[in-house]
Amino acid sequence: MCIFCQIVEGEIPSYKVYEDEYTLAFLDIAPIADGHVLLIPKHHEQFVEDLPEEIYTALFDSLKGLVNPIQAVFDAPASNIGLNNGPNAGQIIPHVHIHIVPRPKKAGPTLSSSAGRFKPRNKEYFEEIADKIRKEIKR
Ligand code: AMP
Ligand code: ZN
């Protein structure tokens, strides 16, 4: 089972910010910026074009609902939304995932390179951010 399927099954912990029948969103463990979220379909597929229609639609519906709350928490007027679709495009985890990275006015690096990533943070860092995003989604 892939690592994101294990997160869906609850076998690996994650800092969830949103969940519905078809999709799950949680904090990226090596964020490029505060509030870096990964949105995934619960259904395993490596490539976005292979997702069943219903799940594809649900995924992009969730994306639409998440962008504004995530941006609001970090006072960001914009966000980078990315999908690495295959290993040659930098896809490391072979399960469709959309990166949502809020971009405040004073934003850091934009590329998802390991060089631009934060050093590993503690549990409190992730829990505080996940909690803020969850509350904003419910507003
Ligand atoms: P990609 O290069 O598009 O496949 O990105 C995979 C992303 O998954 C990277 O940004 C990683 O930091 C992130 N990641 C890997 N393992 C975990 C995990 N257990 N929980 C949260 N994010 C993860
Ligand atoms: Zn999977």
Image: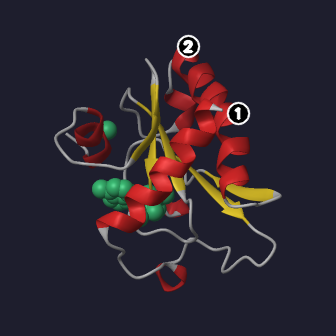
Q: Which residue is mark 1?
A: 64
Along the horizontal axis of the image, is 70 left or right of 117? right
Crowd class of label 2 (few under 14; some 14 to 19; many from 20; radius 10 Å) = few
Between 79 and 5, the one nearer to me in the picture: 79
Along the horizontal axis of the image, is 49 left or right of 122? right
The amino acid type found where label 1 is placed reads Lys
Residue 87: percent from left, percent from top: 45, 58
Residue 92 shows in this picture = no
Residue 3: percent from left, percent from top: 26, 48
**Ligand 1, what quadrant?**
bottom left
Q: Earlier in the sequence, mark 1 or mark 2?
A: 2
Residue 116 disc label? none
The amino acid type found where label 2 is placed reads Glu
Tag 1's secondary structure? helix
Residue at image coords 46%, 51%: 130
Residue 96: percent from left, percent from top: 47, 41
Residue at image coords 62%, 41%: 136
Residue 110 shows in this picture = yes
Crowd class of label 1 (few under 14; some 14 to 19; many from 20; radius 10 Å) = few
Tag 2's secondary structure? helix
Residue at disc 2, CB closer than 8 Å to ligand 2: no
Residue 127: percent from left, percent from top: 38, 56
Between 136 and 70, the one nearer to me in the picture: 136
Residue at image coords 24%, 48%: 13
Residue 54 disc label? 2
